[in-house]
Image: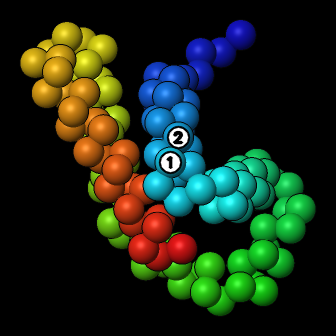
Amino acid sequence: MHDDPHRPLRDDVRPLGRILGDTIRRQTGDDLFEHVERVRGLAKGFRAGADEGFTELIAGSPVLRRSIDVRNPYVDPINLVQVELLRRLRAGDGDEDRLREALLVTVNGVAAGMRNTG
């Protein structure tokens, strides 16, 4: 059995996803959350090689395509900051309360970006 070099990152992303989902629901409601989950599931399947609707979703929605294109340059660096904050929290490297607060700020930043760009 081979070790998965991406497992620590996946372990970090899952709790962030739950926090982000809770934040989206709280700030925008269930309709947007369900749409985001549908798109996320299609994108995840697409990355795994299953094109069950993702290409059509993007092709049929220039607004969604534009939203993704506009949002990614801002969200991608925030995701990198989140990974570093989680690494520091797990390592006990710094003031835990401040690190948790910074992590929540990044989650709110991603949620705000999604709310503002669709």
Disc 1, disc 2: CB below 8 Å? yes
Residue appearing at x 66%, y 54% in the figure = 30
Q: Amino acid at mark 2?
A: Asp
Q: Residues within 10 Å of mark 2 (few under 14, many from 20)?
A: some
Q: Amino acid at mark 1?
A: Arg
What whole-number distance in Å separates the C-alpha atoms at marks 1 and 2?
A: 6 Å
Q: Is residue 34 left or right of residue 4?
A: right
**For numbered disc 2, what is the local secondary structure?**
helix
**For numbered disc 1, what is the local secondary structure?**
helix
Residue appearing at x 85%, y 63% in the figure = 51
Disc number placed over residue 34 in the picture, else none: none
Residue appearing at x 60%, y 81% in the figure = 65
Q: Is residue 76 left or right of residue 37?
A: left
Give the residue number, with chain letter if any, for mark 2.
22
Direction right: furthest residue: 52
Give the residue number, with chain letter if any, for mark 1.
26
Horizontal and vertical percent position of residue 61 = 71, 85
Q: Is residue 24 left or right of residue 51?
A: left
Horizontal and vertical percent position of residue 45 = 78, 51
As displayed, is residue 113 above or below residue 76?
below
Direction left: furthest residue: 95
